[in-house]
Image (spheres, rainbow, N blue to C red):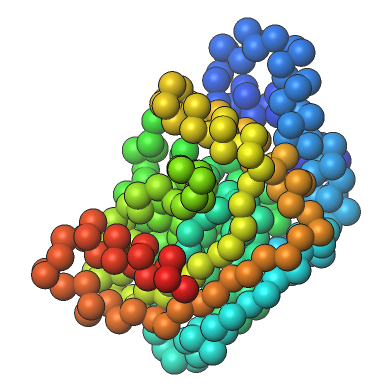
Amino acid sequence: MREITEKTIDVGEILRSKMGAKARFVPSPLVSWLKRIAHQDEVNKFLWDNRELVGTPWLEECMRYLDMTLEVEGEENLPPKDDGKLYTFVSNHPLGGIDGVALGSIIGRKYDDKFRYLVNDLLMNLPGLAPLCIPINKTGNQSRNFPAMVEAGFKSDNHMLMFPAGLCSRRKKGIVRDLTWKKTFISKSVEYHRDVVPIHFGGQNSDFFYRLANFSDSYLKKVNVAMLFLVDEMYKNVHKKFRMKFGKPIPWQTFDKSKSPMEWAKFVYDRVYEL
């Protein structure tokens, strides 16, 4: 696990790890601005103050820190933790950060930390979260190790928590929804006989975020600029109440040859937005 220091998150160091020697060409005023957008000082203080916490207790402390109130529905649909089965939990991703924290705190408490996220590899910089994560490189070209990481997660004895869109939701024509879901969770759940538990999380980011995300998606397709603002969006969502609802598990046998994996992914996507 990464050592926790009073400066665990260092934007300059992250840039160097991602850009190599090219990082020296990034203007220092831009680095300073990125540090403010990433709330580097506030995040580092939280990490340092809670350096003894790991996994679900760390997630729960995040919830207290952000003063999040959860209105949870359908908890009775969560499978018993001692039924001997493994599950794939899939959710929409409206906020791009604290929705994952909230879901992990509920699932982690229910299943004694026996779950793993498939997440952006930048989140591996958070020591309290890292043990719960299987990292995916989303900051550049897709990592060559992606298939192996997914395979390792599904072969493990942990439940999987996934956001199949891969990105947080976008707003199109006034409606906040995920982009098209990837089919990986379908094919791997069938291969490893995992029932799928659909989850809907309510909430949205700022108008600025959606305008930026749509601009980035249209004109800067290789660079997800909006992702840089997700920490700032998290701080904008403090003290708020969010609704989340668990649906009934969908047996893996449902996903037969009558539809393609992409069509089944759309089937689950629709089920989530019906919750």
Question: Where 95 sits versus 26, above or below?
Answer: below
Q: State the residue at coordinates (78%, 37%).
A: 39
Question: Where 207 sits versus 243, above or below?
Answer: above
Q: Position of residue 144 (x, y in %)?
A: 34, 38
Q: Is residue 180 visible?
A: yes
Direction front: furthest residue: 173
User: Which quadrant would residue 201 be assigned to in this image?
Assistant: bottom right
Q: Position of residue 211 (x, y in %)?
A: 56, 32
Q: State the residue at coordinates (23%, 78%).
A: 254
Question: Where 1 sits versus 213, above or below?
Answer: below
User: Which quadrant would residue 23 be assigned to in this image?
Assistant: top right
Q: Is residue 158 visible?
A: no
Question: Where 207 sits versus 71, above or below?
Answer: above
State left or right for residue 173 relative to residue 31.
left
State left or right for residue 87 relative to residue 128.
left
State left or right for residue 90 relative to residue 18.
left
Closer to the camera, 84 or 78? 78
Q: State the residue at coordinates (29%, 66%).
A: 267
Q: Position of residue 108 (x, y in %)?
A: 61, 73
Q: Position of residue 261 (x, y in %)?
A: 21, 60
Direction left: furthest residue: 258
User: Which quadrant would residue 250 be assigned to in this image?
Assistant: bottom left
| Count of numbered badges drawn on the protein | 0
Closer to the camera, 33 or 132? 33
State left or right for residue 157 relative to residue 186.
right
Q: State the residue at coordinates (63%, 8%).
A: 25
